[in-house]
Image (cartoon, helix red, strand yellow):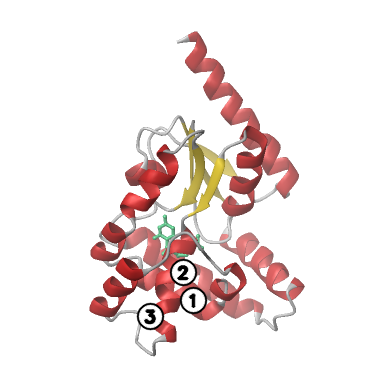
Amino acid sequence: MIIAIDGPAASGKGTLGKRLAAHYGLRHLDTGLIYRGVAKAVLDAGHAPDDRARAIAAAEGLDLTRYDEPSLKTQAVDEAAAVVSAIPEVRAAVLAFQHNFGRTRPGAVLDGRDIGTVIFPDAEVKLFVTATPQVRAGRRVAELQARGVKVNPAEVLADIQRRDERDTTRGISPLKLAPDAHLLDTTHLDIDAAFRAAIDIVEAVRAGRKRG
Ligand code: C5P
């Protein structure tokens, strides 16, 4: 089984993806980490994220099997990831890895921006997880503060809005709701309630398939 989860920044899709994978005994891939890895490699080498040739070379040379998650979850990398991910050759370089990951038994939960629309358009279950920008920014602030990072809440909100704009308006693989995706709005849900709602959706889809 493949479960595709798409949604905007800080919508909770990563946490949900992890929990769904554990629940169904599937593998989990947070595809945002791939673009973050590319962005960090470019920044660490002292280049600008919109330097196409450097970004493409970084994507082609990246070890996609190992991530140092905390160092990839910084505000500088947030922004740079949204820039490198809009480069078609960067996306092409990391496509086969995602396909192989999902097709390896017993299947996987992948979360990102284009999983249900581009990477696995035939995924058994597609979820589109969202929440208002204000709620998403609030969660991101809490998460950063819990890690001891000093944050300016207005800046975090502006960062999220800028990334939403980039991710939904870019020419390649923009973030959008697949026609057959199930919308899960977590604005008024905590993570446990969101997880239960996601399970209900997955179970309803599976029951429908068995009947059909
Ligand atoms: O999900 P996360 O916020 O970690 O993703 C970081 C950035 O990577 C996003 O803002 C987006 O530009 C890009 N991304 C993407 N396609 C994916 C996953 C992430 O373009 N499947």
Image marks 1 and 2: residues in contact by CB distance under 8 Å: yes
Q: Nearer the viewer, residue 61 or 33?
A: 61
Provide the secondary structure element on which disc 3 rests. Answer: helix
Q: What residue type is labelled 3?
A: Val
Image marks 3 and 2: residues in contact by CB distance under 8 Å: no
Mark positioned earlier in the residue sequence (3 or 2): 2
**Quadrant of the displayed image that contains ligand 1:** bottom left
Provide the secondary structure element on which disc 1 rests. Answer: helix
Crowdedness of circle 2 by 10 Å Cα count: few (<14), some, many (20+)?
Answer: many
Q: Which amino acid does label 2 sit on?
A: Arg
Provide the secondary structure element on which disc 2 rests. Answer: helix
Residue beneath disc 2: 36
Crowdedness of circle 3 by 10 Å Cα count: few (<14), some, many (20+)?
Answer: many
Mark positioned earlier in the residue sequence (1 or 3): 3
Measure the alpha-carbon separation of dots 1 and 2. Answer: 6 Å
Q: In which quarter of the image is residue 61?
A: bottom left
| 124 lies above or below 183 | above
- Left/right placement of residue 123 relative to residue 87 reads right
| 20 lies above or below 157 | above
Q: Nearer the viewer, residue 163 or 21?
A: 21
Residue beneath disc 1: 77
Q: Residue 42 carries which label?
A: 3
Q: Residue 45 carries which label?
A: none
Q: Is mark 2 within 8 Å of ligand 1?
A: yes
